[in-house]
Amino acid sequence: MVDAVGIIVCGVFAALAGLHLYWAAGGRFGADVTVPTVDGKASFTPSPTATVIVAGAFILAMIVVLGRIGALDDLAPEWLFRWGTWAIALVFLLRAIGEFNLVGFFKRVRNTQFARWDTFVYSPLCVAIAAMMAIVGGTAD
């Protein structure tokens, strides 16, 4: 079961990396609900470089999971994959909780299109990813 969960979360990371690369290359599908807004204006404008870095982070997370489930045994020490898995779980859990203003379950700004997507898609996805990472990270060696 742990291997299956690892493969599922790798698929999620691959899809998210691909989506970020699409946006970095100028794609617009879905881009209008990916950044929090304040008074109808984006709170920040992600550069193509920053978007590629995020895609790279998803790919790195995928590598950590593959290492944790034993698919990359000789790439790095096992403890690095184990602790990396828990670190990624913590990052996604914190993202779901949010920064108490624009993102996460505890955000104050709730009447924007981004906020609705964040409440019903992005934050629940982050919780699901954190849970899957905990399953993968919690396996006995």
Image (tube, rainbow, N blue to C red):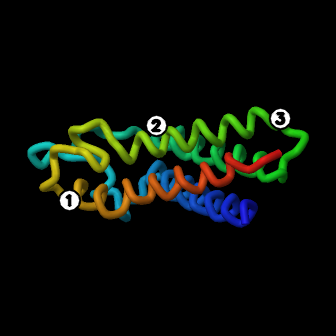
* Residue situated furthest left in the rendering: 39
Amino acid bearing label 3? Ala
Image quarter in which the N terminus is found: bottom right
Image location (x, y in percent) of residue 89: 55, 44
3D distance between C-alphas at marks 2 and 3: 26 Å
In the drawing, does residue 130 fall left or right of residue 80? left
The tag earlier along the polypeptide, 2 or 3, is 2
Amino acid bearing label 1? Gln
Q: Secondary structure at mark 3?
A: loop
Q: Which residue is mark 3?
A: 76
Q: Which residue is mark 2?
A: 50
Picture quadrant where residue 46 is located: top left
The residue lying toward the viewer, choosing from 80 and 15, is 80
The tag earlier along the polypeptide, 1 or 3, is 3
| Residue drawn where x is 88% and y is 44% of the image | 73
How crowded pointer 3 is (Cα within 10 Å; few <14, some 14-19, many 20+) is rated as: few
In the drawing, does residue 67 fall left or right of residue 60? right
Q: Which residue is mark 1?
A: 113
| Residue drawn where x is 68% and y is 52% of the image | 136
